Image (cartoon, helix red, strand yellow):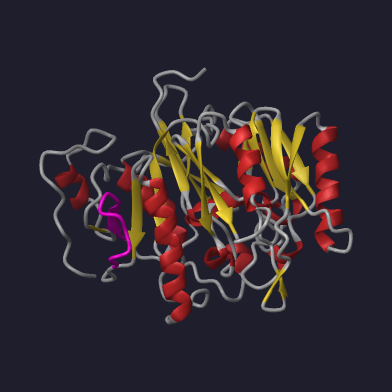
Amino acid sequence: MPEETPPRTGELNAAGVPLEAAAESLPAITRQTAPGAGGDIAPTGTAGTNDRMPAEWAPHAGTWMAFPTPNATFGDGAGLAAARAAWATVANTIVRYEPVTMLINPGERTELLDPRISIVEVPLDDAWLRDSGPTFVHTATGGVRAVDWTFNGWGAQPWATWDDDRHLARRIARLAGVPHISSPLTQEGGGFHVDGAGTVLLTETVQRDPDRNPGWSRERVEAEIHARLGTSTAIWLPRGLTADYGVFGTRGHVDIVAAFTCPGTVVVHTQPDRGHPDHEVTREITEILRDNRLEVIELLAPTVTEVDGELADYSYVNHYVANGVVVVCAFDDPRDADAARVLRHAYPGRDVVLVDARDIFRFGGGIHCITQQQPIEETRWN
């Protein structure tokens, strides 16, 4: 590992620990320029059962991302370069509205990132931080805690490696200066979506995937989810989009098919083409959500349904809500503008910025998949 770059002196992290001292406690992580990182990890156990995950549209302290690294997903040539450019564009957009910390493999460098972005060297296997990173929640006293879900490469997929990424949530918690709690539930951040008011969306093929959680019943999954996220109602969707079960897919992440925009309202990927396999998938999901008395806002799927002869899972649902902005996937598609209009109405008072996401989706995900929000502390939320 390259020699550690010392942090700027005199600054404190979120836990009030001097950055110099915090950095010394991180032998596996090299700091470059990320102020506000560090701190000890609290012991895991039964703590956290009164925690609550705020909705994505709640105020953020910042956004965490990870920079693509050579691996089976991106390769080490033109594909990797395209991915890095796409990730950088997303980060450079978000940093106009809130702080961004980019994790990068030790020894790697990039000139693609806005200088306002904080960079921290951390060993990485992949770059889908929504999935491998922590889920940040509020504690009952208004602090912030990081949930460390068990991560096994989206159900031990043959192309995935996770020797480093399985430790990533704890490392980020340490950098953020917040305690963490470990969960025995194997899942990823893209596999659930909360409204911040007690309801969570799940899919049968993620949380109950036998390669993730063999033998887990719905009841056991819900008990763990509710304990970690502070939810009380789980709505189960049968599956995700069809292409999400192909190479580099997640086997059904909900964040590409349905997302809350406020309590009681969800945007849903809608495939109007009756000949497309997702037509029936999205029809069934819409019916389930309406049966649960949710208002459904339909987001029509892009007109592009195939890329290089393979079924595409392009989706506008996979957007990211940051402070003052909604960052929306664009595909150079006639429906891009309509999606922006719908989401502008769904999130009043926020800018809506379209970012070309084709070089993110070609590797298995979208803008929401590569971003992870850290909420601000609240002195009181209940």
Q: Is residue 17 magenta?
A: no
Name the chief secondary structure element in magenta: loop
Q: Residue at x 63, y 41 (%)?
A: 341
Question: Residue 298: where, in percent of width, then height?
Answer: 75, 42
Residue 273 vertical placement versus 95 (above, below): below
Q: Kindly give the residue lying farthest to the left in the view shown.
A: 9
Q: Residue at x 67, y 64 (%)?
A: 211
In the image, taking residue 187 as reference, residue 65 lies left or right, namely left
Q: Is residue 115 magenta?
A: yes
Question: Residue 75: where, in percent of width, then height?
Answer: 47, 79
In the image, taking residue 33 as reference, residue 313 lies left or right, namely right
- Marks counted in the figure total 0
Residue 336 appearing in the image: yes
Residue 48 vertical placement versus 22 (above, below): above
In the image, taking residue 230 as reference, residue 202 lies left or right, namely right
Q: Residue at x 28, y 59 (%)?
A: 29
Q: Quadrant of the N terminus?
A: bottom left
The magenta segment: 110-121
Residue 125 appearing in the image: no
Question: Residue 213: where, in percent of width, then height?
Answer: 67, 56
Question: Residue 269: where, in percent of width, then height?
Answer: 73, 49
Q: Kindly give the residue lying farthest to the bottom in the view shown.
A: 77
Pick the residue in front: 311 or 213. 311
